[in-house]
Amino acid sequence: MRKLLLRDMNKTMKVFLDEHGEQSFKKCIDVHELASKLKTDMDIDPVLQENLGAILLCFGEIEHELKYGERIPEDTEDEKRARVVAEMKLKELEEAKKEAAANGTEVDMSEFKIPVIEPKKPILKLLYLISITDMKFAAQKMFEYDKILFEMGTQRHKVADEQAFMAMLTKKYKKKFYDEEEVHEMAPEPSKVYSSDSRIQGIVEKINDLTSIPEAPDALKNAFAITLFCMEAAFDSRSKDFLKFAFDEYPDRDYLIVTQPHTVVES
């Protein structure tokens, strides 16, 4: 059953249609209606067709969403017989009309009492909505169940071929479809290269604690600082005039860091 559903994935995907009739990965199909939708494109055993939804819910523990939706109720045995009788009466009437037309006579309609079959109205039904992804992983759980039974000797059916098939799905759909043997890998060591500059790299390699702030090489220093900058309020608007003269004192620097008292409005 798993191979049938997953091998013909393109056919299976066709039945997962949303309310607009477009293929969707959303939960849009009732699990109990899946088999009836698939039987048009797949050769499904009648017993499997009747129990597919229950199998997926029980053994596959398929993830589903409960939601009410409108469905036409199935015909009872009496309703099925009434439909068969109505179809037979219609065929007899058609044959009688052909015979009458050939003989140039009229059909006596009183001899043909065709029962009227009223169309059924949809009723609310509890649906078990699933998606194509839910079905894939339900197949995975069912495979794991069979694998355990095989390892216990309870099931004689070998799972090697099926395991290869599930591995193929893993590769094709970029998803893990069965639990492989766990492989423990050591985490990669963090890179010890901090900078491409050999001078900075040499300084960093000598640090052996988390609090030290090493002195940078003089050649790499490109900023200077004024640790406390104050200006008389009357001349506050001319505060930026000092910038030119400050950089004239340090022509090899690109940045000036200025700090001011926290209680003073920024100039």
Image (cartoon, rainbow, N blue to C red):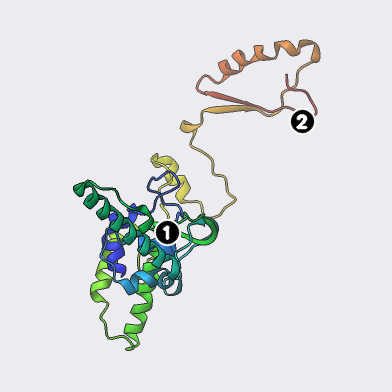
Q: Quadrant of residue 78?
A: bottom left
Residue bearing mark 1: 115
Q: Amino acid at mark 2?
A: His
Taking depth in this image into account, of 24 and 73 the one nearest to the observer is: 73
Q: Residue at x 42, y 71 (%)?
A: 60
What is the secondary structure assignment of the residue under circle 1?
Answer: loop
Measuring from the top left, give residue 247's x and y in whole percent. Answer: 57, 18
Q: Residue at x 44, y 56 (%)?
A: 116
Residue 137 shows in this picture: yes
Measuring from the top left, give residue 250's x and y in whole percent. Answer: 55, 21
Residue bearing mark 2: 262
Cα distance between the residues tagged 1 and 2: 96 Å
Q: Quadrant of the N terminus?
A: bottom left
Q: How many marks?
A: 2
Measuring from the top left, give residue 43's x and y in whole percent. Answer: 25, 65
Q: Are marks 1 and 2 in contact (CB under 8 Å)?
A: no
Crowding at mark 2 (Cα within 10 Å: few <14, some 14-19, many 20+):
few
Q: Quadrant of residue 117?
A: bottom left
Image depth: mark 1 or mark 2 in front = 1
Measuring from the top left, give residue 56's x and y in whole percent. Answer: 41, 69
Q: Identify the disc placed on residue 128.
A: none
Residue 183 shows in this picture: no
What is the secondary structure assignment of the residue under circle 2?
Answer: loop
Taking depth in this image into account, of 176 and 50 the one nearest to the observer is: 50
Reply above or below: 201 against 208: above
Reply above or below: 140 against 201: below
Q: Quadrant of the C terminus?
A: top right
**Which of the marked residues, 1 or 2, is nearer the chain's N terminus?**
1
